Amino acid sequence: MKEMHFETTNPDCELFLSSEGVGFLMLSASSDSLRKWQGLTVADVSVCAGVRWAFEFKGQRHTLLPGHWRYTERDTSTITRHFETNFGLWFVERWDWGQPDEGLKVTLSTGADHEVKSAIDDISISATPLWTLSPAGYPSCGGIDATLSLHPASPGEIQIQAQLLDIPVKIKCQKVSLNDAPLKAGEWQILQDAQPERIPTPKDACRGEQFEREVLLTHECTLGLKMGEKAQLVFSFENSSEEHKRNIVRVSDQVSLDCESESLTTAFTNCAESLNQLIRSRADGRLGLQAGLPWFTQFWTRDMCHSFRAAFLWSGRFADGQALITDLWMQTKGRSIPNYTTTQTTTNNSIDALPLLLLTTADLVDHTGWTALMETSLPEIEHRLLEAARVFASNDLIRHGPADTWMDAQKHTSLGVQIACSPRADRAFEIQAFWISALHRWSELLGKKGNIQLNATLANAAARGLSTLRRLYLGTDGKSWADTLRPDNTPDFSLRPNILLGLSALHRADCLLKLMSHSELQKCLENLIEMNVIMPYGVRTLSPETSVRHSLPINELFDDESAYIHENKIHFHPYHEFGSRHGLEHPDWAYHNGTIWPWLSNSACELLLIAGLNEPAEQLRNTLVFHANQGIQGGALPELLDGLSSHSPWSWPKGAPHQAWSEAAFIHMIVEEWMGIRIVNIGKTLQLDSSKWKGFPDFSFEFTVQNGKIQINKYGQTSRIQFTAKESGALLEVVHRMNPAAEEPLQIYKLNRSEPLILKLCFS
């Protein structure tokens, strides 16, 4: 990764850099006044910091302005921006995140590597730090008032301490000179009568957030420089309260993986810690899971559902998960399930939120059982299930609008009409599969509760649905499955990854093989590999070999806005960014038409392992391990990756650098697919498939279940399972599968806290 390099002359481009333990940096290449430094991994506080540079030249003071910016370079540990003033004087500003223990270094050099057009003697440089703080997870930093107090500082250093949400925060800023030598002169000067400034944040405003934020100015330092010398500021962020650190609920307190592969262990821990930070209380006091940071802070129902097992069940946060799910059922009783909510709005353009919520609730019941709180949701759950059952029982399918699935990006025409960027009306494959899976799972759950009539009704509807799905979606070649049915009843065989989402849900509901045979699954996956949907570095949202026919004349509606639109079709578009093709591209065209979403890798990996295609599954796993370790997100996984890898085998991250369902997908992948662990029967039964451990490194995995803790140690051809019961006399049932051959019987054991189970493994 040392050879990675990025250069841009596009003033609308935003760049990311990060390091674990510090956070991430977002710079606007156009040199907006505020450059963001946000501590994602430091307690529950976010910090934004910027530097305003000024220089004195020929007796006059000048501020380095956005108009002076010329271009930006980036590698894996630095961002370097080049400025040229009106006098031909060049400045080079370098942000260095390479050594997190040393803090963030911001260096300004004069004339480095540039021909200076004016005769310049020594100049005077002034640096003014810009500060704003807020609780982590707020849509924009500076969203609340923060009171900062000043403390006496040693020469060359200032300290700012704040009491934010009862969290003591200390920020240090040191200044150093050439060759990192501490300055003895030019100490920090308090800015007299300095008032907070309102800084415009146009890029946040484009995302529906703040138009401006409050920035505090407190000090300024001035020093003389010769040509080629540098002024450097070092920022460090510290939470000095050990008591507060002990009160922070961390996922790793409840779940821990210690693996022979150090990189896999680090990736797992990073994702668990990052995901935990997104579990937050909304403005109305209700618990939720934010989709991502720094700007993807809405509470999306589908994202929460896809992330739920990792965020609340494998983490042992059962009470929080139960409160979230039951509250959501209560709030949406008799109404549509929200797509996402913010502090101001609720959006309901989602057809998958309801079946996903039903599946998530089933996961919760498997882990924690029928609590009194869950019982209050049961009438609403049964009502929703029966509505869907009637549709499938009549050999019909669930219908929806063109942008109601997770592929929901839309663009406005010049007349203000919204057009789907990935048209999928009106019967998407995964929507039918989600509902059929929900019917099948709830048929079994309600049957265990003694509701035999409802059990039979739901089971019959699920069987009818599977039959309809196979009849209408399977291509004549036996390997192609339609992504959706169009309103005119013709199948759309555009190759997309949604088939993976649907098949994964059916597998978790134990009815996948009722839709297709094992060999048909293998052919389907091999086709997706051959047609470049499943790649070593991720799963693309559209195959380069197929296109999407639009029902509208989009070439005329958008006046050739994108090079990837022609013949009224949308073609493979791998790059989600502004500024491609001289600013003509818009990222919404790429969002679901070629870019890679890391969260899709979990479904792909699951199915590839079932089909015996272990090599591509391992490649997907290793890609996420890499990004969670050495990627530019700093111990997190991003929203997107480029659909074409410019740094093979690793693709460039895009979108939000910290995304919940990306991190949850990695945890699901490791725990459920590579370690073959499932919890059922109200947390009392551990299902273990050790046949998946072939080629997987030795590990020790500890996690919480409803009635105690489980530790699994795998070493060589042996596994040791230890159960620590919460209450005396509690038992754990272990259902072990050691060979993928269907005819081999499952081994069933009973465990208590005093009798560890030793299993002999079989890797044939």
Image: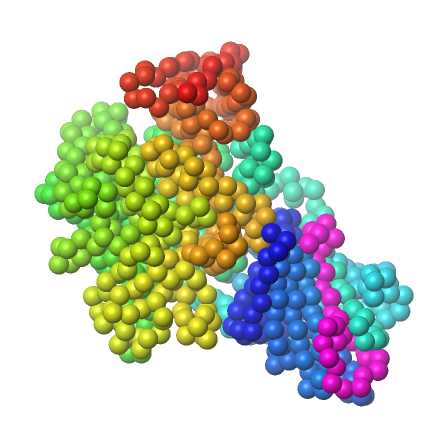
Q: Is residue 714 magenta?
A: no
Is 454 positioned to the left or the right of 146 in the image? left
Magenta stretch bounds: 98-127
Which residue shows up at 34% across the image and 17% down it? 746
- Front one among 696 and 17: 696
Q: Is residue 120 magenta?
A: yes
Measured along the vertical axis of the image, is residue 620 above or below residue 139?
above
Measured along the vertical axis of the image, is residue 448 above or below residue 501?
above
Give the percent coordinates (x, y) of residue 89. 73, 81
Which residue shows up at 17% across the image and 41% down it? 470
Instruction: Return the residue found at the far left.
Output: 394
Instruction: Return the residue found at the far right.
Output: 184
Give the percent coordinates (x, y) of residue 145. 60, 64
Identify the image quadrant of residue 131.
bottom right
Give the percent coordinates (x, y) of residue 739. 37, 20
- Front one among 262 and 232: 262
